[in-house]
Image (cartoon, helix red, strand yellow):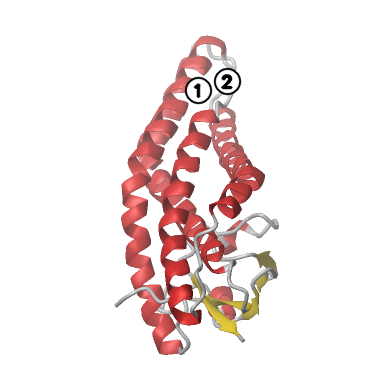
């Protein structure tokens, strides 16, 4: 099975999304350790600050830098493939538009990092509320509870983040690879139909819109699978394995 971002039949698109799933898994595995190192350092710093003063702050610059590297790597890889396939299909000389990727990063990547921070803060504050306040060693108890929580959950959280960002970055890159065509461009939502798909994504399968428009999935608007730039509900984004295909019309 090979990637085919211009697959025209349902069968070819299904083969395409299966091949893409495997390719994205390779990139997610490649980048998981970097995310793990950054988030582990963040949690260890938080625990130290709580132990010392009872308060903490979230430092996000390192995570932003790691995700920036992921987006440039993944978007560039899949964008180049999509541009090459578009060139073969249309006879045009298409190239991956890295400027579009950089523009998306500058506009929206910080929001994704802040979303991770909000979730981390919610969990840590919940841990603090569960500890009986007033104990002389409450800061030490809370700090240890935070470290214990991370030890139990770091695998799912780091692997999940790597997957979510790779999915979004891959679709961003593909869109940036096809967008330079002068043909009339349409993008198609392609769902991984393996029995594990969510109902709203099954309903979205084959939904076709102009390249600059957004899909409507479960009441949310997404520019592509994995996108949060238009405020999509997180349940339509996290863990998504869907992909894009394109139709270029004369």
Q: Residue at x 41, y 81 (%)?
A: 14
User: Depth check: 90 or 17 in front?
Assistant: 90
Q: Secondary structure at mark 1?
A: helix
How busy is the neighbourhood of tag 1: few (under 14 within 10 Å), some, or many (20 plus)?
Answer: many
Specify whether 132 is left or right of 193. Answer: right
Q: Which residue is mark 2?
A: 56
Specify whether 58 is left or right of 239. Answer: right
Q: Which mark is residue 209?
A: none
Q: Which residue is mark 1?
A: 46
Please tell me whether residue 250 is drawn above or below residue 45 in the rendered image. below
Q: Position of residue 98 (x, y in %)?
A: 53, 52
Q: Position of residue 224 (x, y in %)?
A: 58, 66
Q: Position of residue 196 (x, y in %)?
A: 42, 73
Q: Secondary structure at mark 2?
A: loop
Quadrant that contains the N terminus: bottom left
User: Depth check: 218 or 176 in front?
Assistant: 176
Please tell me whether residue 156 is drawn above or below residue 211 in the rendered image. above
How busy is the neighbourhood of tag 2: few (under 14 within 10 Å), some, or many (20 plus)?
Answer: some
Specify whether 208 is left or right of 24. Answer: right
User: Could you give the CA–CA distance between mark 1 and mark 2, rounded to whole angstroms?
Assistant: 5 Å
User: Depth check: 127 or 10 in front?
Assistant: 10
Q: Is residue 218 visible?
A: no
**Which quarter of the figure has residue 153?**
top left
Badge 1 vs badge 2, beta-carbon distance below 8 Å: yes
């Amino acid at each position: 099975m090979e990637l085919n971002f211009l697959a025209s039949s349902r069968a070819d698109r299904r083969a395409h999304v299966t091949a893409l799933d495997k390719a994205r898994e390779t990139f997610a595995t490649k980048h998981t350790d970097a995310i793990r190192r950054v988030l582990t350092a963040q949690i260890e710093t938080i625990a130290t600050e709580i132990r010392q003063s009872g308060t903490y702050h979230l430092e996000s610059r390192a995570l932003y830098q790691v995700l920036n590297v992921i987006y440039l790597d993944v978007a560039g890889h899949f964008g180049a493939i999509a541009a090459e396939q578009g060139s073969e299909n249309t006879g045009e000389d298409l190239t991956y538009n890295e400027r579009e990727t950089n523009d998306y990063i500058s506009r929206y990547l910080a929001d994704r990092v802040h979303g991770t921070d909000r979730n981390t803060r919610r969990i840590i504050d919940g841990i603090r509320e569960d500890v009986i306040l007033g104990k002389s060693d409450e800061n030490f108890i809370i700090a240890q509870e935070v470290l214990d929580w991370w030890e139990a959950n770091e695998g799912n959280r780091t692997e999940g983040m790597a997957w979510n960002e790779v999915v979004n970055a891959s679709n961003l890159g593909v869109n940036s690879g096809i967008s330079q065509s002068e043909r009339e461009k349409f993008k198609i939502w392609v769902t991984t139909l393996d029995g594990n798909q969510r109902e709203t994504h099954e309903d979205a399968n084959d939904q076709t819109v102009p390249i600059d428009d957004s899909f409507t999935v479960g009441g949310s608007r997404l520019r592509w699978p994995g996108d949060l730039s238009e405020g999509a509900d997180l349940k339509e984004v996290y863990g998504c394995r869907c992909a894009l295909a394109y139709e270029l019309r004369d």
